[in-house]
Amino acid sequence: MTRMKLFKSIRWRFLLIHIVSSLLTALVLLLGNLLANYILQFNKINAALVWVINHIGSMPVMVVSGAALYLFFYYMLSRPLVRYASEIADTLQLMENGKFHAPVPVQSPHELGLIASRANRVAEELNDYLREINHGLQEIAKGHFQYDIPVKPDHDLGEIAKSINEMSAQLHHSIQEERKAEKTKNDLITGVSHDLRTPLTSILGFLELIEKDRYFDEVELRYYIGIAYEKSVTLKKLIDDLFEYTRINNDMPLDLKQIDMNDFFRQLAEEFVPNLESAGVSCRVHAPEHPVIIKADGDHLVRAYENLISNAIRYGSAGKRIDIYIQEREDKAIIQVVNYGDPIPERDLPFIFDRFYRADKSRSKQTGGGTGLGLAITKSIIEVHGGTISASSSERQTCFETILPTTQ
Protein backbone atom coordinates (compact mmCIF):
# COMPACT_ATOMS: atom_id res chain seq x y z
CA MET A 1 0.00 0.00 0.00
CA THR A 2 1.42 3.37 -1.01
CA ARG A 3 1.70 6.25 1.44
CA MET A 4 -1.09 8.21 -0.31
CA LYS A 5 -3.45 5.22 -0.17
CA LEU A 6 -2.55 4.64 3.47
CA PHE A 7 -3.36 8.23 4.46
CA LYS A 8 -6.58 8.09 2.45
CA SER A 9 -7.58 4.88 4.23
CA ILE A 10 -6.97 6.47 7.65
CA ARG A 11 -9.07 9.49 6.62
CA TRP A 12 -11.89 7.17 5.57
CA ARG A 13 -11.68 5.37 8.93
CA PHE A 14 -12.09 8.66 10.82
CA LEU A 15 -14.91 9.65 8.43
CA LEU A 16 -16.63 6.34 9.19
CA ILE A 17 -16.27 7.02 12.94
CA HIS A 18 -17.84 10.43 12.32
CA ILE A 19 -20.75 8.91 10.39
CA VAL A 20 -21.37 6.15 12.96
CA SER A 21 -21.18 8.69 15.81
CA SER A 22 -23.71 10.88 13.98
CA LEU A 23 -26.07 7.95 13.34
CA LEU A 24 -25.86 6.78 16.95
CA THR A 25 -26.51 10.35 18.12
CA ALA A 26 -29.53 10.63 15.83
CA LEU A 27 -30.81 7.25 16.97
CA VAL A 28 -30.50 8.12 20.66
CA LEU A 29 -32.16 11.52 20.06
CA LEU A 30 -35.00 9.79 18.22
CA LEU A 31 -35.48 7.31 21.03
CA GLY A 32 -35.23 10.16 23.56
CA ASN A 33 -37.93 12.08 21.68
CA LEU A 34 -40.20 9.06 21.62
CA LEU A 35 -39.59 8.49 25.32
CA ALA A 36 -40.31 12.18 26.07
CA ASN A 37 -43.62 12.07 24.16
CA TYR A 38 -44.55 8.94 26.07
CA ILE A 39 -43.72 10.50 29.45
CA LEU A 40 -45.80 13.63 28.65
CA GLN A 41 -48.96 11.46 28.73
CA PHE A 42 -48.53 10.89 32.47
CA ASN A 43 -49.25 14.01 34.55
CA LYS A 44 -47.68 12.61 37.68
CA ILE A 45 -44.20 12.23 36.23
CA ASN A 46 -44.06 14.82 33.40
CA ALA A 47 -43.74 17.95 35.53
CA ALA A 48 -39.97 18.26 35.17
CA LEU A 49 -40.12 17.55 31.46
CA VAL A 50 -42.88 20.12 30.93
CA TRP A 51 -40.86 22.74 32.86
CA VAL A 52 -37.80 22.11 30.62
CA ILE A 53 -39.91 22.42 27.47
CA ASN A 54 -41.65 25.61 28.66
CA HIS A 55 -38.59 27.39 30.04
CA ILE A 56 -35.71 26.10 27.84
CA GLY A 57 -37.30 24.69 24.75
CA SER A 58 -37.10 21.27 23.19
CA MET A 59 -34.82 22.38 20.34
CA PRO A 60 -31.94 23.73 22.51
CA VAL A 61 -32.16 20.63 24.66
CA MET A 62 -31.90 18.39 21.60
CA VAL A 63 -28.94 20.42 20.20
CA VAL A 64 -27.01 20.29 23.45
CA SER A 65 -27.84 16.65 24.01
CA GLY A 66 -26.94 15.80 20.41
CA ALA A 67 -23.54 17.53 20.68
CA ALA A 68 -22.78 15.78 23.96
CA LEU A 69 -23.88 12.43 22.57
CA TYR A 70 -21.86 12.92 19.37
CA LEU A 71 -18.70 13.75 21.32
CA PHE A 72 -19.27 10.79 23.62
CA PHE A 73 -19.77 8.33 20.76
CA TYR A 74 -16.89 9.82 18.72
CA TYR A 75 -14.57 9.55 21.73
CA MET A 76 -15.59 5.96 22.50
CA LEU A 77 -15.27 4.82 18.88
CA SER A 78 -11.97 6.62 18.17
CA ARG A 79 -10.42 5.82 21.57
CA PRO A 80 -8.82 2.46 20.47
CA LEU A 81 -7.44 4.13 17.35
CA VAL A 82 -6.01 7.06 19.32
CA ARG A 83 -4.58 4.75 22.00
CA TYR A 84 -2.90 2.62 19.29
CA ALA A 85 -1.53 5.73 17.59
CA SER A 86 -0.19 6.85 20.98
CA GLU A 87 1.57 3.48 21.42
CA ILE A 88 3.13 3.83 17.96
CA ALA A 89 4.23 7.41 18.78
CA ASP A 90 5.83 6.27 22.05
CA THR A 91 7.74 3.50 20.27
CA LEU A 92 8.83 5.90 17.50
CA GLN A 93 10.04 8.23 20.26
CA LEU A 94 12.22 5.39 21.57
CA MET A 95 13.52 4.82 18.03
CA GLU A 96 14.27 8.54 17.76
CA ASN A 97 16.38 8.16 20.89
CA GLY A 98 18.32 5.35 19.22
CA LYS A 99 16.50 2.36 20.77
CA PHE A 100 15.54 0.29 17.73
CA HIS A 101 15.01 -2.96 19.64
CA ALA A 102 11.52 -2.05 20.98
CA PRO A 103 8.99 -3.20 18.33
CA VAL A 104 5.59 -1.57 17.84
CA PRO A 105 2.64 -3.92 18.63
CA VAL A 106 0.98 -4.79 15.30
CA GLN A 107 -2.83 -4.95 15.12
CA SER A 108 -4.11 -6.38 11.87
CA PRO A 109 -6.08 -5.80 9.76
CA HIS A 110 -5.55 -2.14 10.55
CA GLU A 111 -4.10 0.84 8.69
CA LEU A 112 -2.11 1.85 11.76
CA GLY A 113 -1.09 -1.79 12.07
CA LEU A 114 0.45 -1.47 8.61
CA ILE A 115 2.31 1.67 9.77
CA ALA A 116 3.51 -0.22 12.85
CA SER A 117 4.63 -3.14 10.70
CA ARG A 118 6.60 -0.84 8.43
CA ALA A 119 8.12 0.99 11.41
CA ASN A 120 9.17 -2.36 12.86
CA ARG A 121 10.73 -3.39 9.56
CA VAL A 122 12.63 -0.09 9.29
CA ALA A 123 13.79 -0.40 12.91
CA GLU A 124 14.91 -4.00 12.33
CA GLU A 125 16.84 -3.04 9.19
CA LEU A 126 18.46 -0.10 10.99
CA ASN A 127 19.31 -2.29 13.98
CA ASP A 128 20.84 -5.01 11.76
CA TYR A 129 22.84 -2.46 9.76
CA LEU A 130 24.04 -0.71 12.91
CA ARG A 131 25.18 -4.10 14.22
CA GLU A 132 27.12 -4.62 10.97
CA ILE A 133 28.72 -1.17 11.28
CA ASN A 134 29.53 -1.78 14.94
CA HIS A 135 31.08 -5.16 14.11
CA GLY A 136 33.14 -3.49 11.38
CA LEU A 137 34.36 -0.83 13.81
CA GLN A 138 35.34 -3.54 16.29
CA GLU A 139 37.33 -5.34 13.58
CA ILE A 140 39.05 -2.07 12.61
CA ALA A 141 39.79 -1.42 16.30
CA LYS A 142 41.53 -4.81 16.40
CA GLY A 143 43.79 -3.70 13.54
CA HIS A 144 41.96 -5.51 10.71
CA PHE A 145 41.99 -2.49 8.41
CA GLN A 146 41.21 -4.58 5.32
CA TYR A 147 37.71 -5.28 6.70
CA ASP A 148 35.07 -3.54 4.60
CA ILE A 149 31.67 -2.70 6.05
CA PRO A 150 28.93 -3.46 3.47
CA VAL A 151 27.80 -0.20 1.89
CA LYS A 152 24.11 0.13 1.04
CA PRO A 153 23.53 2.50 -1.89
CA ASP A 154 21.14 5.45 -1.45
CA HIS A 155 21.20 5.00 2.32
CA ASP A 156 22.31 7.57 4.91
CA LEU A 157 23.94 4.89 7.07
CA GLY A 158 25.49 3.54 3.88
CA GLU A 159 27.27 6.89 3.49
CA ILE A 160 28.53 6.55 7.06
CA ALA A 161 29.74 3.00 6.33
CA LYS A 162 31.48 4.26 3.19
CA SER A 163 33.19 7.04 5.17
CA ILE A 164 34.32 4.52 7.80
CA ASN A 165 35.76 2.27 5.08
CA GLU A 166 37.61 5.21 3.53
CA MET A 167 38.89 6.29 6.96
CA SER A 168 40.06 2.71 7.64
CA ALA A 169 41.83 2.51 4.27
CA GLN A 170 43.51 5.88 4.86
CA LEU A 171 44.54 4.84 8.37
CA HIS A 172 45.94 1.56 7.03
CA HIS A 173 47.83 3.48 4.35
CA SER A 174 49.21 5.91 6.94
CA ILE A 175 50.36 3.06 9.18
CA GLN A 176 51.99 1.31 6.21
CA GLU A 177 53.71 4.54 5.25
CA GLU A 178 54.90 5.02 8.82
CA ARG A 179 56.29 1.48 8.90
CA LYS A 180 57.89 2.01 5.53
CA ALA A 181 59.43 5.27 6.74
CA GLU A 182 60.75 3.52 9.85
CA LYS A 183 62.24 0.74 7.72
CA THR A 184 63.67 3.33 5.33
CA LYS A 185 65.28 5.15 8.24
CA ASN A 186 66.77 1.91 9.60
CA ASP A 187 67.99 0.89 6.14
CA LEU A 188 69.49 4.34 5.65
CA ILE A 189 71.34 4.17 8.97
CA THR A 190 72.58 0.67 8.13
CA GLY A 191 73.69 1.69 4.65
CA VAL A 192 75.37 4.86 5.83
CA SER A 193 77.15 3.05 8.65
CA HIS A 194 78.47 0.40 6.27
CA ASP A 195 79.55 2.83 3.56
CA LEU A 196 81.16 5.24 6.01
CA ARG A 197 82.97 2.50 7.88
CA THR A 198 84.69 1.03 4.78
CA PRO A 199 86.71 4.11 3.65
CA LEU A 200 87.16 5.26 7.25
CA THR A 201 88.68 1.91 8.21
CA SER A 202 91.13 2.18 5.30
CA ILE A 203 92.04 5.76 6.24
CA LEU A 204 92.64 4.81 9.88
CA GLY A 205 94.63 1.74 8.84
CA PHE A 206 97.04 3.64 6.61
CA LEU A 207 97.33 6.55 9.06
CA GLU A 208 98.20 4.02 11.78
CA LEU A 209 101.01 2.63 9.59
CA ILE A 210 102.29 6.16 9.09
CA GLU A 211 101.88 7.12 12.76
CA LYS A 212 103.88 4.04 13.86
CA ASP A 213 106.54 4.61 11.19
CA ARG A 214 105.81 1.25 9.59
CA TYR A 215 107.02 2.20 6.11
CA PHE A 216 110.38 1.66 4.41
CA ASP A 217 110.94 4.94 2.66
CA GLU A 218 109.36 8.16 1.48
CA VAL A 219 107.95 6.49 -1.63
CA GLU A 220 105.93 4.02 0.47
CA LEU A 221 104.92 6.87 2.80
CA ARG A 222 103.57 8.87 -0.14
CA TYR A 223 101.80 5.74 -1.37
CA TYR A 224 100.03 5.35 1.98
CA ILE A 225 99.16 9.04 2.08
CA GLY A 226 97.80 8.83 -1.49
CA ILE A 227 95.51 5.94 -0.59
CA ALA A 228 94.32 7.72 2.58
CA TYR A 229 93.63 10.84 0.53
CA GLU A 230 91.65 8.92 -2.10
CA LYS A 231 89.57 7.24 0.62
CA SER A 232 89.01 10.65 2.25
CA VAL A 233 87.75 12.01 -1.08
CA THR A 234 85.41 9.01 -1.37
CA LEU A 235 84.21 9.62 2.17
CA LYS A 236 83.56 13.30 1.47
CA LYS A 237 81.64 12.45 -1.71
CA LEU A 238 79.50 9.96 0.23
CA ILE A 239 78.75 12.57 2.92
CA ASP A 240 77.94 15.20 0.27
CA ASP A 241 75.64 12.80 -1.59
CA LEU A 242 73.98 11.72 1.64
CA PHE A 243 73.40 15.35 2.61
CA GLU A 244 71.97 16.09 -0.86
CA TYR A 245 69.68 13.05 -0.78
CA THR A 246 68.39 13.92 2.71
CA ARG A 247 67.79 17.54 1.72
CA ILE A 248 65.89 16.58 -1.42
CA ASN A 249 63.64 14.17 0.48
CA ASN A 250 62.81 16.70 3.19
CA ASP A 251 60.78 19.17 1.13
CA MET A 252 63.66 21.22 -0.17
CA PRO A 253 62.65 24.66 -1.51
CA LEU A 254 62.72 24.90 -5.31
CA ASP A 255 63.71 27.98 -7.29
CA LEU A 256 61.42 27.33 -10.24
CA LYS A 257 62.16 29.01 -13.55
CA GLN A 258 61.31 28.32 -17.18
CA ILE A 259 64.01 26.21 -18.82
CA ASP A 260 64.40 25.29 -22.50
CA MET A 261 65.50 21.65 -22.39
CA ASN A 262 67.15 21.92 -25.82
CA ASP A 263 69.57 24.65 -24.66
CA PHE A 264 69.91 22.98 -21.26
CA PHE A 265 71.27 19.72 -22.69
CA ARG A 266 73.45 21.38 -25.32
CA GLN A 267 75.16 23.37 -22.57
CA LEU A 268 75.40 20.31 -20.30
CA ALA A 269 77.00 18.27 -23.10
CA GLU A 270 79.57 21.04 -23.61
CA GLU A 271 80.51 20.92 -19.94
CA PHE A 272 81.14 17.17 -20.21
CA VAL A 273 83.53 17.48 -23.20
CA PRO A 274 86.70 16.86 -21.09
CA ASN A 275 85.18 13.76 -19.47
CA LEU A 276 83.90 12.52 -22.83
CA GLU A 277 87.27 12.98 -24.53
CA SER A 278 89.07 11.28 -21.65
CA ALA A 279 86.78 8.26 -21.96
CA GLY A 280 86.89 8.28 -25.78
CA VAL A 281 83.13 8.82 -26.02
CA SER A 282 81.08 11.23 -28.15
CA CYS A 283 77.77 12.77 -27.10
CA ARG A 284 74.99 13.84 -29.46
CA VAL A 285 71.88 15.83 -28.50
CA HIS A 286 68.80 15.10 -30.65
CA ALA A 287 66.38 18.00 -30.07
CA PRO A 288 63.27 19.19 -31.93
CA GLU A 289 63.29 22.49 -33.80
CA HIS A 290 60.84 24.14 -31.38
CA PRO A 291 61.74 24.89 -27.74
CA VAL A 292 60.70 22.35 -25.09
CA ILE A 293 59.94 24.48 -22.01
CA ILE A 294 59.55 23.15 -18.47
CA LYS A 295 59.40 24.89 -15.09
CA ALA A 296 62.16 23.60 -12.84
CA ASP A 297 65.01 24.39 -10.48
CA GLY A 298 68.01 24.54 -12.84
CA ASP A 299 70.68 23.70 -10.25
CA HIS A 300 68.90 20.57 -9.05
CA LEU A 301 68.05 19.55 -12.60
CA VAL A 302 71.72 19.83 -13.55
CA ARG A 303 72.61 17.52 -10.64
CA ALA A 304 70.04 14.95 -11.78
CA TYR A 305 71.19 14.77 -15.41
CA GLU A 306 74.87 15.01 -14.48
CA ASN A 307 74.40 11.73 -12.63
CA LEU A 308 72.78 10.11 -15.69
CA ILE A 309 75.47 11.34 -18.12
CA SER A 310 78.27 10.40 -15.71
CA ASN A 311 76.83 6.90 -15.42
CA ALA A 312 76.53 6.66 -19.20
CA ILE A 313 80.21 7.64 -19.59
CA ARG A 314 81.39 5.34 -16.79
CA TYR A 315 79.49 2.21 -17.83
CA GLY A 316 78.89 2.84 -21.53
CA SER A 317 82.34 3.83 -22.74
CA ALA A 318 82.61 0.57 -24.69
CA GLY A 319 79.84 1.81 -26.96
CA LYS A 320 81.90 4.93 -27.86
CA ARG A 321 78.87 7.25 -27.92
CA ILE A 322 76.00 8.64 -25.90
CA ASP A 323 72.72 9.86 -27.41
CA ILE A 324 70.36 12.30 -25.67
CA TYR A 325 66.88 12.40 -27.20
CA ILE A 326 64.48 15.26 -26.36
CA GLN A 327 60.81 14.97 -27.35
CA GLU A 328 57.56 16.72 -26.45
CA ARG A 329 54.38 14.71 -26.36
CA GLU A 330 51.01 15.54 -24.78
CA ASP A 331 52.32 18.35 -22.54
CA LYS A 332 55.22 16.18 -21.41
CA ALA A 333 58.95 16.55 -22.00
CA ILE A 334 60.47 13.12 -22.60
CA ILE A 335 64.26 12.90 -22.24
CA GLN A 336 66.20 9.72 -22.97
CA VAL A 337 69.88 9.28 -22.10
CA VAL A 338 71.13 6.28 -24.08
CA ASN A 339 74.49 4.48 -23.97
CA TYR A 340 75.64 1.38 -25.83
CA GLY A 341 77.90 -0.31 -23.27
CA ASP A 342 77.37 -3.46 -21.25
CA PRO A 343 73.72 -4.02 -20.28
CA ILE A 344 72.42 -3.79 -16.72
CA PRO A 345 71.51 -7.30 -15.52
CA GLU A 346 67.76 -7.85 -15.64
CA ARG A 347 67.67 -8.87 -11.96
CA ASP A 348 69.14 -5.48 -10.99
CA LEU A 349 66.87 -3.18 -13.03
CA PRO A 350 64.06 -2.93 -10.42
CA PHE A 351 66.53 -1.81 -7.73
CA ILE A 352 68.94 0.57 -9.45
CA PHE A 353 67.17 3.66 -8.05
CA ASP A 354 67.36 2.37 -4.46
CA ARG A 355 69.77 3.95 -2.02
CA PHE A 356 73.25 2.36 -1.81
CA TYR A 357 72.36 -0.19 -4.50
CA ARG A 358 75.13 -1.01 -6.97
CA ALA A 359 74.06 -3.05 -9.94
CA ASP A 360 77.44 -4.64 -10.58
CA LYS A 361 79.84 -4.71 -7.65
CA SER A 362 82.81 -5.96 -9.65
CA ARG A 363 82.24 -3.42 -12.41
CA SER A 364 81.88 -0.66 -9.82
CA LYS A 365 85.31 -1.45 -8.48
CA GLN A 366 86.80 -1.42 -11.97
CA THR A 367 85.20 1.89 -12.89
CA GLY A 368 85.83 3.63 -9.60
CA GLY A 369 82.28 2.96 -8.37
CA GLY A 370 80.10 5.47 -6.66
CA THR A 371 78.32 6.06 -3.41
CA GLY A 372 75.21 4.18 -4.46
CA LEU A 373 73.21 7.41 -4.03
CA GLY A 374 73.56 9.00 -7.48
CA LEU A 375 70.52 7.42 -9.13
CA ALA A 376 68.50 7.71 -5.91
CA ILE A 377 69.24 11.46 -5.88
CA THR A 378 68.30 11.72 -9.57
CA LYS A 379 65.00 9.93 -8.95
CA SER A 380 64.17 12.20 -5.99
CA ILE A 381 64.92 15.36 -8.01
CA ILE A 382 62.80 14.22 -10.96
CA GLU A 383 59.89 13.23 -8.71
CA VAL A 384 59.99 16.47 -6.70
CA HIS A 385 59.49 18.25 -10.05
CA GLY A 386 56.37 16.15 -10.71
CA GLY A 387 58.10 13.79 -13.13
CA THR A 388 58.97 10.10 -13.42
CA ILE A 389 62.12 8.16 -14.27
CA SER A 390 62.60 4.64 -15.58
CA ALA A 391 65.35 2.49 -17.04
CA SER A 392 65.55 -0.24 -19.64
CA SER A 393 68.55 -2.25 -20.78
CA SER A 394 69.32 -4.78 -23.50
CA GLU A 395 72.36 -6.12 -25.31
CA ARG A 396 72.00 -3.26 -27.80
CA GLN A 397 71.56 -0.26 -25.48
CA THR A 398 70.76 1.06 -22.00
CA CYS A 399 68.23 3.87 -21.76
CA PHE A 400 67.30 6.11 -18.83
CA GLU A 401 64.03 7.92 -19.57
CA THR A 402 62.65 10.89 -17.64
CA ILE A 403 59.24 12.49 -18.17
CA LEU A 404 58.57 16.03 -16.91
CA PRO A 405 55.51 18.28 -17.34
CA THR A 406 55.94 21.12 -19.82
CA THR A 407 54.54 24.64 -19.52
CA GLN A 408 52.17 26.25 -21.98
Image (cartoon, grey):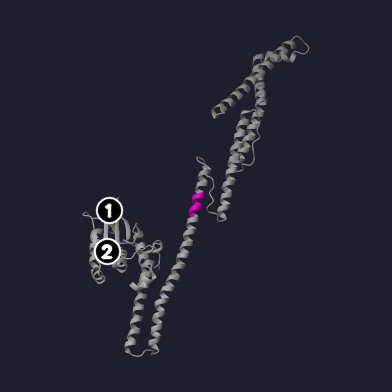
Which region of the structure is painted magenta?
Answer: 164-170
Instruction: Check the image and name the residue furthest to the front.
Output: 395
Location of residue 218 in the rendering, given as x and y in whole percent from the top left corner: 32, 89
Does the magenta segment cover residue 165? Answer: yes
Q: Circles 1 and 2: CB distance less than 8 Å?
A: no
Find residue 267 and report its image quarter.
bottom left
98 sits left or right of 243 in the view: right
Would you say the magenta stretch is mainly helix, strand or loop?
helix
Does the magenta segment cover residue 398? Answer: no
Which residue lies under the disc numbered 2? 322
226 sits left or right of 282 in the view: right
What amino acid type is highlighted by mark number 2?
A: Ile
Which residue lies under the disc numbered 1? 328
Q: Is residue 297 visible?
A: no
Q: Residue at coordinates 63% horizontally, 28% vertically from top-left?
A: 110
Find residue 195 and report its image quarter.
bottom left
Q: How many numbered dots are placed on residues in this image?
A: 2
Q: Is residue 139 visible?
A: yes
Location of residue 16 in the rendering, given as x and y in whole percent from the top left corner: 62, 21
What amino acid type is highlighted by mark number 1?
A: Glu
Q: 221 above or below 364?
A: below
Q: 192 above or below 162?
A: below
Local SS, label 1: strand
Instruction: Check the image and name the residue furthest to the right.
Output: 44
Q: CA distance from mark 1 to mark 2?
A: 20 Å
8 sits left or right of 257 in the view: right
